[in-house]
Image: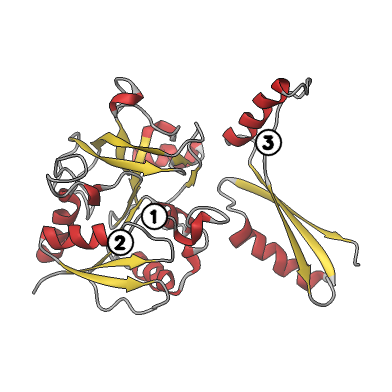
């Protein structure tokens, strides 16, 4: 049976269609989920897609976090449901306290849109098993609120437990796609929860799954094949 | 009706680039002597009924769970004079 992967649409979500498409290209069955539905339609995993849910009013992700669909997702994520939060989805996951820390406005106050080079720091999550630790990938980055912050204790804990999942590559100039694009502490681009089922990152793997568009590479496809492999083996 | 004001500010240790941008603009506009600027949010809540301890407790809870993100922000709650 094909794995069913849900993609949530909130008012203001932009990247749901690309995420559904990425799921399909990876070989899974994409399922659209609406923010007002508590029912997850028996999906095996959930993607919280990027965009500007509720216009980023109050704080990015703050209002979406209290939507009916999130009530179910929060409860099931704690019980092991794989959840991937991309960009606004990552912001929602921190607001929901499924991931520690918070996302703030980029330190330079500009919207950023570019190809971003990242290092995958761990393959020990539901969404990164098809990468190898230390692998460098290039996927698009586009956001206004991408500055990851947490207090020192939380940052040390994330490092010690191997839960920094992705880091912006520090060498070279920021304009090359290298370097920290937004002032994120310790160059953190994405993190995972302790169990490895909940992952959030700012750059957009769903925009790099076909050679024709995005970076012209398919470096993002590994997210969607990783989860598929995990679900098939489960 | 009573008004309750919730002020939300980024914690002191969190970088506030918006406040810095404002501060840097001040000398250009001829306003000297401002050493630092930090920018926050103010919520004005018009409350039905009396603002008793129970109502204030609920507003505190609202501020803590929703209006502020206590990972990065501090908040204060104060009652303004009834109109």
Sort mark 3 into few (<14), some (14-19) or many (20+) by Cα contacts within 10 Å: some
Secondary element at tag 1: loop
At horizontal 25% and vertical 38% (from top left) the residue drawn is A121
Q: Position of residue B55 (x, y in %)?
A: 77, 72
Front residue of A82 and A4? A4
Give the left or right position of residue A113, taking residue A232 as reference: right
Q: Where B12 sits versus A19, above or below?
A: above
Residue wearing tag 2: A16
Q: Which mark is residue A9?
A: none
Label 3: chain letter = B
Q: Where B53 sits versus A214, above or below?
A: below
Front residue of A53 and A62? A53
Residue A10 occupies which quadrant of the picture? bottom left
Front residue of A178 and A188? A178
> Which tag is nearer the camera, tag 1 or tag 3?
1
At horizontal 43% and vertical 34% (from top left) the residue drawn is A182
Query: Closer to the N terminus: mark 2 or mark 1?
Result: 2
Question: Are labels 1 and 3 assigned to the same chain?
Answer: no
Q: Position of residue A56 (x, y in %)?
A: 50, 55
Front residue of B15 and A205? A205
Q: Is residue A67 visible?
A: yes
Secondary element at tag 3: loop
Residue wearing tag 1: A51
Separation of residues labelled 2 and 1 (CA atoms): 8 Å
At horizontal 20% and vertical 39% (from top left) the residue drawn is A215
Q: Are marks 2 and 1 in contact (CB under 8 Å)?
A: yes
Separation of residues labelled 1 and 3 (CA atoms): 27 Å
Secondary element at tag 2: helix
Q: Position of residue A222 (x, y in %)?
A: 15, 49
Residue B37 occupies which quadrant of the picture? top right
Residue wearing tag 3: B38
> Which tag is nearer the camera, tag 3 or tag 2?
2
């Amino acid at each position: 049976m094909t794995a069913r992967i849900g993609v949530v649409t909130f008012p203001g979500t932009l990247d749901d269609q690309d995420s559904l498409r990425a799921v399909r290209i990876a070989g899974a069955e994409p399922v659209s989920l609406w923010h007002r539905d508590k029912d997850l339609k028996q999906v095996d995993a959930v993607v919280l897609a990027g965009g500007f849910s509720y216009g980023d009013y109050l704080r990015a992700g703050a209002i979406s976090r209290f939507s009916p669909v999130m009530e179910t997702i929060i409860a099931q994520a704690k019980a092991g449901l794989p959840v991937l939060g991309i960009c606004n989805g990552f912001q929602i996951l921190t607001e929901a306290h499924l991931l520690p820390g918070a996302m703030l406005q980029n330190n330079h106050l500009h919207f950023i849109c570019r190809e971003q080079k990242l290092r995958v720091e761990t393959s020990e999550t539901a969404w990164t098993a098809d990468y190898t630790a230390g692998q460098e990938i290039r996927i698009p980055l586009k956001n206004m609120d991408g500055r990851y912050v947490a207090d020192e204790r939380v940052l040390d804990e994330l490092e010690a437990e191997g839960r920094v999942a992705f880091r912006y590559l520090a060498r070279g100039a920021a304009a090359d796609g290298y370097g920290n694009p937004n002032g994120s502490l310790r160059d953190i681009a994405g993190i995972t929860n302790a169990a490895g089922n909940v992952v959030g990152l700012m750059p957009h793997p769903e925009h790099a799954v076909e050679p024709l568009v995005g970076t012209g590479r398919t470096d993002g496809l590994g997210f969607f094949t990783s989860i598929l492999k995990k679900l098939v083996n489960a | 009706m009573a008004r309750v004001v919730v002020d939300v500010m980024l914690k002191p240790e969190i970088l506030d680039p918006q406040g810095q941008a404002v501060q840097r603009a001040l000398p250009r506009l001829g306003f000297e002597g401002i050493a630092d600027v930090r920018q926050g949010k103010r919520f004005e809540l018009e409350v039905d009924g009396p603002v008793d301890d129970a109502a204030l407790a609920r507003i505190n809870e609202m501020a803590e769970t929703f209006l502020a993100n206590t990972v990065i922000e501090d908040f204060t709650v104060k009652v303004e004079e009834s109109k």
